[in-house]
Image (cartoon, rainbow, N blue to C red):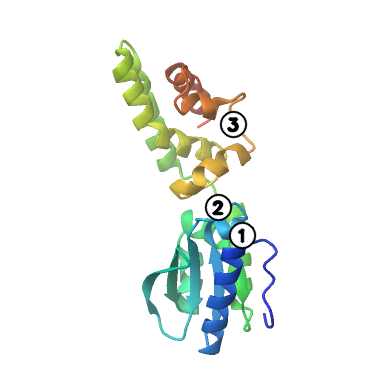
Amino acid sequence: MTGQPELSFVLHEVHRRLLTEELSQATTVGVLGFRVGGSVARGTARPTSDLDLWLYWPQAQPFEVEERGGLPIERHGHTLERAWREVGEEAGLALLGWAESRVLHDPSGDLARIQAEARRRLAAFRTPEAERRRLRHWLTSTLGKLEGAAQDQATFLTRTTLWTLAQAVCAVNDHPPPAVTRMWELLPELSLKPRGDWLGDLLGGPDEVPTFREVAGWVLARL
């Protein structure tokens, strides 16, 4: 990819400006590839969201964090060889990161091919049976502990098991669980999910404990 990058997906001017500056600096010194990830790439960023950048070099570079314009910028300096290994050997979070990122500089075409492979593998992803067993165990155990628990204890158990419940909803959909900051966006997008405002009820609503029982039962019937 050459010339001015296409940044219409970027919501906020501060991110467009920083991306343009970062890409210009990187290409000037011979970067082999450049992509942006996270909420900026997905088009869901807030003006204060950080900038997650992956830069590809002949040799790996140390991870860097810098604040510019009041925003943190994370730079991951990898090689193309590592990128191919990452997509070929890993699953879940790495594949999601590749699938949702935006490639802004790719003169060799390697990043486009790696991204296509990541999306292919993500589409073929199936939750391993061992992970399904783990999730069934934790949810069944929590439901048992909720029986006869005092209200404050039941609320505590429910809230501390919410992440496991979210992972289980992903597993029902054969979708790898994303990073914590992405989970809230992902759950409503999944094709298989409980009906109603179950997320709102779980997150501090007056019926969070009964909603947890209901959603956990829905999940267990499908895992």
State the residue position of label 3.
193
Mark 2 touches mark 1? (CB < 8 Å): yes
Residue 141 in view, yes or no = no
Q: Nearer the viewer, mark 2 or mark 3?
A: 2
Three-letter amino acid code at the position of disc 3: Lys
Mark 3 touches mark 1? (CB < 8 Å): no
Q: Nearer the viewer, residue 173 or 163?
A: 163
Q: CA distance from mark 2 to mark 1?
A: 8 Å
Question: How many marks are shown on the rendered structure?
Answer: 3
Residue 94 in view, yes or no = yes
Element type where label 2 sits in the image: loop
State the residue position of label 2.
46
Mark sitting on residue 12: 1
Three-letter amino acid code at the position of disc 1: His
Residue at (59%, 51%) from the top-left corner?
A: 44
Coordinates of residue 173 in the picture (x, y in percent): 57, 39
Q: In the image, 72: left or right of 22?
A: left
Coordinates of residue 172 in the picture (x, y in percent): 54, 36
Mark sitting on residue 171: none
Residue at (50%, 89%) from the top-left corner?
A: 29
> Between disc 2 and disc 3, whose residue precedes?
2
The answer to which image quadrant residue 191 occupies is: top right
